[in-house]
Image (tube, helix red, strand yellow):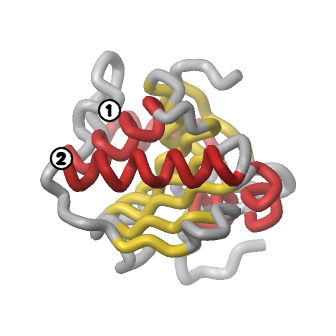
Amino acid sequence: MVPMNAVLKLSRDSAYLQCVRAGRTLICNPVGKGTNLRTELRKKAETMPSTVGNSDNSASPALRTVLDSLDDSKAENIISIDIQGKSSLGDHMVIASGRSNRHVAAVADHLLKALKDGGFGTAKVEGLPGADWVLIDAGDIIVHVFRPEVREFYNLEKMWMAPDLEEETVH
């Protein structure tokens, strides 16, 4: 169980993530490269406003709708990743798991309905018939809903939550 605010280290990497728990949702952002973790956290604290008490209030209405829908559908291990500056695909990537193919399909259907009812338009969907991995493209938010075994195999969190490397050589 991850506490309300935590810094996690990815296994066998020197990458650290700063994570904030909001209900059952874990929102993680990479901690940038610095001389050490303490230096980076101090720099981040100096440049970022405090998130105490309002960890998710800055989220866009569409992201809030996605996270609420996934939580209402009993999706498991919900993680939101800020991909602004990493990719032009969108601003946020949300990854969640369902317990079975049927649960994955139900979570995806519920999310599509919530996005449409929330006025965010009709999202594009891939993988719904098989329901092992459903991809929902809601514009600036990309949602992946996996069966646990498929999620573990592809391990998208590790790829997208790794901090950006600067152009200098890392030893």
| Residue 29 located left or right of residue 52 | right
* Res. 121 image quadrant: bottom left
Please, which residue is most extreme toward the right here? 12
Q: Residue at x 53, y 35 (%)?
A: 26
| Residue 9 located left or right of residue 89 | right
Q: Residue at x 56, y 54 (%)?
A: 105
Say which residue label 2 marks: 118
The tag earlier along the polypeptide, 2 or 1, is 1
Q: CA distance from mark 2 to mark 1?
A: 18 Å
Q: Amino acid at mark 2?
A: Gly
The residue closer to the viewer here, 168 or 85, is: 85
Q: Position of residue 75 (x, y in %)?
A: 57, 38
**Is residue 44 something one can see in this rendering?**
yes
| Circle 2 residues within 10 Å: few <14, some 14–19, many ≥20 | few
- Identify the secondary structure beneath mark 1: loop
**Is residue 33 something one can see in this rendering?**
no
The residue closer to the viewer here, 107 or 138, is: 107
Q: Is residue 168 above or below residue 25?
A: below
| Circle 1 residues within 10 Å: few <14, some 14–19, many ≥20 | some
Q: Amino acid at mark 1?
A: Asp
What's the mark number on residue 56?
A: 1
Q: Residue at x 62, y 61 (%)?
A: 162
Q: Position of residue 71 (x, y in %)?
A: 47, 32
Tell me whether the residue at label 2 lies in contact with that at label 1, contact meaning CB atoms closer than 8 angstroms: no
Q: Position of residue 54 (x, y in %)?
A: 28, 23
* Res. 34 image quadrant: bottom right
